Image (cartoon, coloured by chain):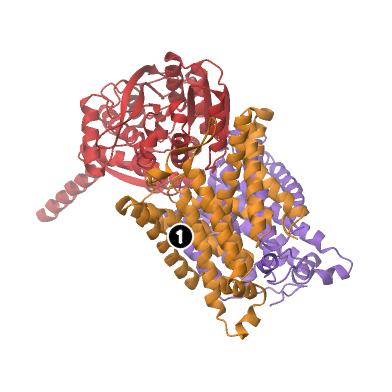
Chain colours: A orange, B red, C purple
Amino acid sequence: MSFALLLEQLLNGLQFGLMLFLLSVGVTLIFGVMNLVNISHGSLFMLAAFFTYTAGARWGYGLGLLVGLAGTIAVAVLLEWLVIRHLYRKSHLDQVLGTFGLMLIFNELVRIVWGSEPIFALTPDWLSGSVQLFGTLYYPTYRLAITGVAIIAGIAIWLLLSRTRIGMLVRAGADKRETVESLGVNINFLFAVVFVIGAVLAALAGIMMGPLITVESGIGDPLLILALVVIVVGGAGSIKGCLAASLLVGMIDTLSRALVTADFAGGAGRALSSMSVYLLMLGVLLLRPQGLFTR
Amino acid sequence: MKTTHTVLKCMLAAGLAITSAAQAEIKLGFMAPMSGPLSITGQDLRRGLDLALEHLDGKLGGETVTVVAANDQANPSVATSELSRLIEQENIDVLMGIAASNVALAIAQPATQAGLPVLYTHAGPDALAGKQCAKNLFFIGHQNDQYGDAMGRYMKQEGVKNLYAMGLDYQAGWEMVDAALKSYGGEAKGKVYTPMGQVDFAPELSRVRSSGVDGLYVFYPGSAAVSFVRQFAASGLKNQVQLYSVGALVDPTVISAQGDAAVGVISANTWNAGIENPENQRFLKDFVKEHGREPTTFAAQTYDAVMYLDAALRKAGGAKDRDALIDALRHNDEFKSIRGNFKLNKNHFPIQDMVIQQVEKTDGGYQQKILAKIEGIADNYVDQCEMKWQ
Amino acid sequence: MKHESSGKFRLGADTWTVGLILLASALAVGLLDVYLLKLLGKVLIFWLIALGLQLLVAQAGVISLGHAAFMATGAYIAGLFSLQGQHDLILMLACVAVACAAFGSLMGALILRTHGLYQLMATLAIAQMAYYGFQSLRSLGGDDGFAVSTRPDILGLVSLNTDFKLLIAIVVILAIGVWMANRIRCSEMGALMRAVRDDGRRVASLGISPYGIKVWAFLISAVYTGIGGALFAHLTRFTSPQLGSWFMSGELIILVLLGGGKTRSGLFLAAAAVVGIQEVVARYTDHWPMVLGALVVARVLLPSGLRLGRKSPRSGPSAADGQATSIQRETS
């Protein structure tokens, strides 16, 4: 592999890792604060993309973004109030099954409203094209934009949690719910706020990734499984762990695909590379269940 | 006394009229994936069927037809029980439809055991083209390898010097890539299969770029088609490498999501809107009028299959004599395909002309311009089939 | 939290209901047409699998989102036997039992080192790897799968080539399965499972390894699921990796969710509901998954006493359960 190719692949790995981070950070935040596994996070991802690009096709990209974010927040608030709120105290399996049921419902709702065919996700001109990084290495502008958004989102969440009053209340509520309640803080409202923040992160991921992948029913689901893998590897509930794990998984996945060919190990190589992410997760679960990057 | 006699005669006449009217009806079973990830395909299969029946005034072979629909959910176990229902409870005369290969395989044996004639409109698995061919199974759409075969021949013809191949890592993907490489004749500089559910193709695209090939042949259906084509265009590879594929990569259901990224893609297909014959023009015009977009190959093949069945039923005089119907389906000279030349091979799979097309941007949207025709494409499994009737 | 009555099982309402259902099924087999026979067969097979899973989930308190792997294993073994021309039913089922017992103990041994969400993820991971494994077998049709053309026969005497005969065999196997599950529940093993579910440390203090008990439960449920898979392959005359997908694993655990942890007849209703939605409701609406989803959500939200898996403690780093790391720790 030439140096330029290696550099390009490293950049691919970094970018894929950050994309994973944008997707997983919402899930790990919600898990860390409310101890809730949310499979329907992928549905919020999907809805945001649908809202944005349907509106965007009619009224332009900017308004599309606003509609996407606002719409997803509205759905999240409703969802939390109607269903999610009642899942906090249930076992993880109940949460998985309940949010799995929600995912099925959302997938069909999208089919009913938008049909089964994928819709067009427009990209504004200033985000299309490539940027010359150096020499012969051109990198798509859009992917760099996703990377930027992911970094900003991560910093914003970290600042929110560690430097603001709400963040402090959230951390306290995560640890000692009853104490915080006895101080007169409305814990239900707090948890709803956290859920909505998670939804905004999912929405950002969906809006950013829509043009890259597809916008159709069920796009969030395979990505959600990957997000769960990242969270387990990084330590569920830990944002720094999530970042580190995303980058690790992104790098491993990218580099293995950069090297493996169809005939590697007589075809078994391909099955292995699909399995590699799961093998990593299994290894972490067995050897260091609290995650690779937590204390 | 006399009145009773008359009444009885009238009742008898009425009874005969009713039974003969009932006998003049054809019950057509239609099975397709109407829910789940393949629902797009199933819905267009249905549109093709509905338009054909509309053009035939709701009659097949001159007799009124009742369509009994079944949703196979692209799930073999659901398909087998739905087939049971269609045969046992609905007493269908003929079954038509099916898009998924696994469903095609799953219903083959039960249908044969029941002696039910089946017209597969969009599935064409290898297994049923060879040793497992059966006299009641007819494939009006294609044999899976035909797309890759035609594309491979075209690439060889055009002198594509260095080729890279990529596909989705599943049965259909392996078949499509292998078929193309076989008729291309040369070695691919690189061959990569990507797992299902993979949404990001950056590492593979980087490898393609660095390999310096001038042609990239891929097979990606459905949502993977949208992601791949968009990422291919965004990576800037479009200027260096020509993308070759099969019709599914850029068909009307995905092309609106792909936008300009699809322009320039060359693909092989069994049908094209530009094929000039009166049957095709009629089909195209009415489909666009009713659905606001061009038909997909799924719709086109199903339309053809209905017309095929209609011609055969006319010849056989109805569906009641199954042997006569099968004979008519085999020797269906009256049939005029919207695809042009069409004939059944010994194994009941088509010998047809494949079209090589390229996506072009027009005022109205996108169009598939015909670049070439590869004539008389059959399949590689016909010799393994033991049926003899030609 | 209600305790199961261990020791001798009274012939309670549940047992009578189960007996009635089995009898009704046997009678129905003689009366129904082929289509309804197939549906009944699917319901009975799912009931069989759910019985095994209920043992694991409700009795032993272990959760698994990966049991479809065993269903696929059973189905593929059945298919392979048919392909090789080996048609003895008992031999085939014995082989399925052994294979799933082995696979089940291995998988159980691995995942039981984890708890809660992590246990869930571990089962999912192993099942996904098995799924990819089946999918990669090009000679067996890859992800398409292959047709299982010949039905098995019993000791070379009676061939199960009609759906009617196969259904009779399924009812018989199911009756055996119900009886065995009952025996396990009432036995010392069953009592130990419940004790381990409720307080593993106390069991350990008695000198019995809770880990070992749970592995046994996993093994037993794996065998039930595998046999169900083999029967399913013969009923539908097809086997494919789809039987091992995470969606199928979800459907299996939904059976126990809907059916409840206590009664066996409840599981029958759950199986009937799931098959009914996927096959009958599907004829009236293409959006049948929404109905299933709504049913699942409704069931989860119901404030009834179903405890599937333990409620994991929320605060602090609980090493025994490997729970969530508090956000507080890392941002302070």
Q: Position of residue A9 (x, y in %)?
A: 60, 36
Which quadrant would residue C259 be assigned to in this image?
bottom right
Q: Nearer the viewer, residue A111 or A12?
A: A12
Residue A138 lies left or right of residue B372; in this view the side is right
User: Label 1 neighbourhood size at 10 Å, few (<14), some (14-19), many (20+)?
Assistant: many
Q: Nearer the viewer, residue B116 or B372?
A: B372
Residue that mark 1 sits on: A105
Which quadrant would residue C281 be assigned to in this image?
bottom left
Q: Nearer the viewer, residue C266 or A47?
A: A47
Q: Nearer the viewer, residue A230 or C72?
A: A230
Residue B331 lies left or right of residue A48; in this view the side is left
Is residue B6 something that shows in the picture?
Answer: yes
Residue at x-position 64% and y-position 43%: A251
Quadrant location of the N terminus of chain C? bottom right
The residue furthest right is C207
Is residue C276 something that shows in the picture?
Answer: no
Which quadrant would residue A236 be assigned to in this image?
bottom right
Q: Position of residue C229 (x, y in %)?
A: 62, 48
The residue furthest left is B2
Specify the amino acid type for callout 1. Ile
The answer to whether residue C274 is above or below residue B59 is: below
Residue B186 lies left or right of residue B342; in this view the side is right
Residue at x-position 60% and y-position 44%: A14
At mark 1, the secondary structure is helix
User: Chain ID for label 1?
Assistant: A
Q: Position of residue B278 (x, y in %)?
A: 20, 26
Residue at x-position 23% and y-position 24%: B277
Quadrant location of the C terminus of chain C? bottom right
Q: Position of residue C21 (x, y in %)?
A: 57, 64
